[in-house]
Image (cartoon, helix red, strand yellow):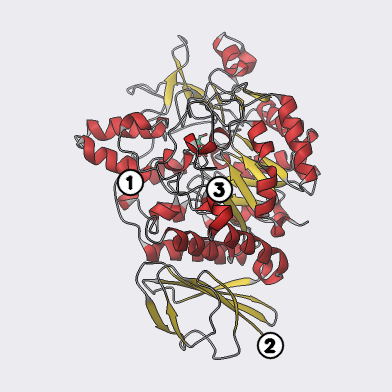
Amino acid sequence: MHFKDKVIYQAYTKSFNDTDGNGYGDIKGVTEKLPYLKKLGVDMVWLNPFYVSPQNDNGYDIADYKAIDPMYGTMEDVEEMIAVGKEYQIDFMFDLVLNHTSTEHAWFQKALAGDKKYQDYYILREAVAGQEYPTNWDSKFGGPAWQPFGDTGKYYLSLYDPTQADLNWRNPEVRKEAADIVNFWMDKGVKGFRLDVINVIGKDEKLINSTGDIDQEKSLYTDKPIVHEYLRELNHNSFGQDPEIITVGEMSSTSIESSIEYSNPKNDELTMVFNFHHLKVDYPNKEKWTKAPFDFLELKQLINDWQIGLGENGGWNALFWNNHDQPRAISRFGNDTQYREKTATSQAHILHFLQGTPYIYQGEEIGMTDPHFTELEQYRDIESINAYKQLKEKGVPHAEAMAILAQKSRDNSRTPMQWNAKENAGFTEGTPWLQVAHNYPEINVERELAEGEIFPYYQRLIQLRKERKIIREGSYQPMFLEHEQLWAYRRILDDEEIITFANFYGKPLKVDLSSEVADQAWHYLLGNYGEKSFNMTLELEPYEAISFEYKS
Ligand code: GLC
């Protein structure tokens, strides 16, 4: 099957399903739920990192790329999961963090002990005369981007947590290690790779101070032209050798131009890209740690620009509302109480009719919400805890800081998967590492499968993508881009057309379509309020989404 037919499910391993009662999800827990994922209809499961790690950044701080952290199980468990997956025609996408290692990785430890070979695996620099560090860059999790390298007087670059040391991709040995890691997992039968923050691997030999402007600073190490060369080399030396392998690059602050290059098959780089611009529409003045409403027109415009930008230039989008780094879209852009089901199905509808590969984040298919935590002690995420400290330092009162975390924290999506109404939502028999959202007695898989409308809607959306070439390959065109409540677009393939309309808000909507839509024999295709006939005066209920099709 071609990658354009596939729908990918993201299981946040740590919070998916715990079979041994240690409070953390595990590999066996994923294997156990394969029948459930098969029922949903997905083709591939992306698992967040489960390699040996001190877990300072929930496994994105890898200490051994080829070994399983005992809290998640064993290598045999992984092999079994892959084998059982085959029986269900479900492949796996592993998450590789190749921009940095944990400082507990043997390479870093050897480097610290004085081994020159391994010192060249990292980005070590001396402080520049007149300033404290080699450059004035900030780490993405707060604080300086440089940490003292033992007692050598040098500093190592760490763009994320101080225990995540950036690798030196200028060193061919590092690039060989990266290919070797990919090949190791390919040999085990892994068919997909998600490459963490892969567009920041290209650092210059000479690193310079930024002006202090955050975008200018990021441009000093993001999307550097050399990244394309590194990716091509990695492709040729590993995943590119198997045409079935799917790769997705997680692209931090990238551009449409760069992403076309990353994902155009002609370039032998990656299959597709994740970009995050549409998930910054509630960051006023680029500031994440605020409590702010989202900008609907900007959200639509961004999705639109990426649809057109990549779609018309041979690139390929990864489509997603949610992941383990984002609050849940249902709470963020919709109504997670009165219209929870309709919000869930309309968001899914909008996304699954677009061009690209849809990703479903665990719990989305049952309408899981943010947990609405109120106490700092409920949070585990290092970025959120750092943000709280910084907010307090700026004089923000506790209650306001908590409201900001409740809106923006990554832990919002990391709460355990809600399987049933039993204690801890059936996620664990022990104590969950992160508290389960309070609403699990009402929102859980068991109940959803028995009487819910969200899971069946996802099933239908996945099935439709497989049935209709137009959904996979049709071109995209916007409609009513300036409308403040309606999300609408068309897909076109030869003599076929699909038009999609969604009311993004909780008040009913009436629109005269004549300026954008031809009055012809449109047939109902799918809608979250059930079948309706086409009318040039479109009336939509709260969070209603509907598509019609036409064939000449
Ligand atoms: C990516 C991951 C995130 C992690 C960061 C650093 O953005 O998705 O969870 O903290 O990279 O590895």
Residue that badge 2 annotates: 552
The residue mark sitting in front, 2 or 1, is: 2
Between the residue at mark 1 and the residue at mark 3, the CA separation in whole angstroms equals 35 Å
Q: Amino acid at mark 2?
A: Ser
Q: Residue at image x 46%, y 63%?
A: 342
Residue that badge 1 annotates: 287
Quarter of the picture containing the C terminus is: bottom right
Q: Quadrant of residue 400?
A: top left
Does label 3 point to a residue whose CB lies under 8 Å from ligand 1? no
Q: Amino acid at mark 1?
A: Glu
Q: Secondary structure at mark 2?
A: loop
Quarter of the picture containing the N terminus is: bottom right
- How many circles with numbers are drawn on the protein? 3
Q: Secondary structure at mark 3?
A: helix
**Height in image: 509 above or below 36?**
below
Between the residue at mark 2 and the residue at mark 1, the CA separation in whole angstroms equals 49 Å
Label at residue 445: 3
Q: Quadrant of residue 126?
A: top left
Q: Is residue 180 left or right of residue 423?
A: right
Label at residue 483: none
Between the residue at mark 2 and the residue at mark 3, the CA separation in whole angstroms equals 41 Å
Mark 1 and mark 3 residues within 8 Å of each other at the beta carbon: no
**Height in image: 20 above or below 85?**
above
Residue 292, horizontal then vertical, whole percent: 29, 52
Q: Earlier in the sequence, mark 2 or mark 3?
A: 3
